[in-house]
Image: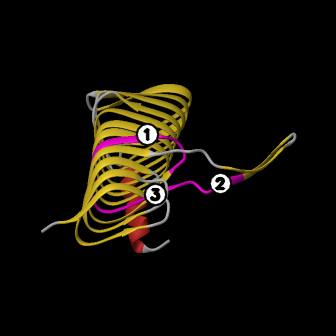
Amino acid sequence: MNGASDKFEKYLREKDVASVSGSGIVHVGEATVKIAGSGKYIAGELLKAAGSVKVEGSLKLRIVKISGAFKVEGDLECEELKLSGAGVINGECKCKEIKIAGAFKTRKLLTDILKIGGAIKTPVLEGGDVHIILNGNSEIDRLKAKYLEVKREEPTFRVMFWDVGLKRKDYYLISESIEINKGNLEAVKCKRVRGDEITIGRFCEIDVVEYTISAKLLEGAKVGRLSKIG
């Protein structure tokens, strides 16, 4: 173990640590964290759990790693969020980096990096690099990002009695407005998309596309009006 790792381990040992096995309650500032399963909380640093986690109040710390169900009644602010399962943030979610495999819902999402495979629902998303692989219908009313990639999950091969073949669900990202610097879109239904460099791919249904540098329409894309602006 190098010097930096030694210092970090010592730092963690000096912090308040709470472990839960089975079910338990951890008080984090003015918030209460209820865990059903197994979990660990290190004050100001880490919340890691497998099972069901419910936070009564708002939560602010560096890292959140959850496998299972995660619900926050207030706001969530962290540097890193990793979720495998289902997450609901009733308030605002502000995280530098978010990786989700499953379903996620929040009132407002602010992030530098978002990678999600599953479904997301939020009225407002503002991000840097946003990557969405649709494995469920998603709804984002207003989306702003430097880079946006949206695509459907690749079809899987399934064998179910006499039904044999590749299965793909017709999932979409549904939005009122998308504003991006650069993006590659697939399976997006939107009233207006505006950006600098945009590629509109298959399964897209967009009323208006406005661009400043370039716009490319691929086979299978449906666009009502395409116009260059600026």
Residue drawn at (34%, 36%) of the image? 106
Q: Earlier in the sequence, mark 3 or mark 2?
A: 2
Q: Which residues are magenta?
A: 134-156
Horizontal side, residue 141 vs residue 139: left or right: left
Horizontal side, residue 102 vs residue 197: left or right: right
Q: Earlier in the sequence, mark 2 or mark 1?
A: 1
Please state which of residues 122 and 221 is positioned toward the viewer in this rendering.
221
Task: Assess whether residue 70 is covered by the magenta stretch.
Answer: no
Q: Quadrant for residue 104, please give it.
A: top left
Please state which of residues 93 and 4 is positioned toward the viewer in this rendering.
93
Question: Residue 20: x percent and y percent?
Answer: 52, 33
Task: Assess whether residue 152 is covered by the magenta stretch.
Answer: yes
Q: Secondary structure at mark 3?
A: loop
Residue matched to label 2: 155
Q: CA distance from mark 3 to mark 2?
A: 14 Å
Question: Residue 174: x percent and y percent?
Answer: 38, 43
Callout 1 amino acid: Phe
Q: CA distance from mark 1 to mark 3?
A: 20 Å
Residue drawn at (28%, 30%) of the image? 74
Question: Residue 152: x percent and y percent?
Answer: 53, 54
Q: Earlier in the sequence, mark 1 or mark 3?
A: 1
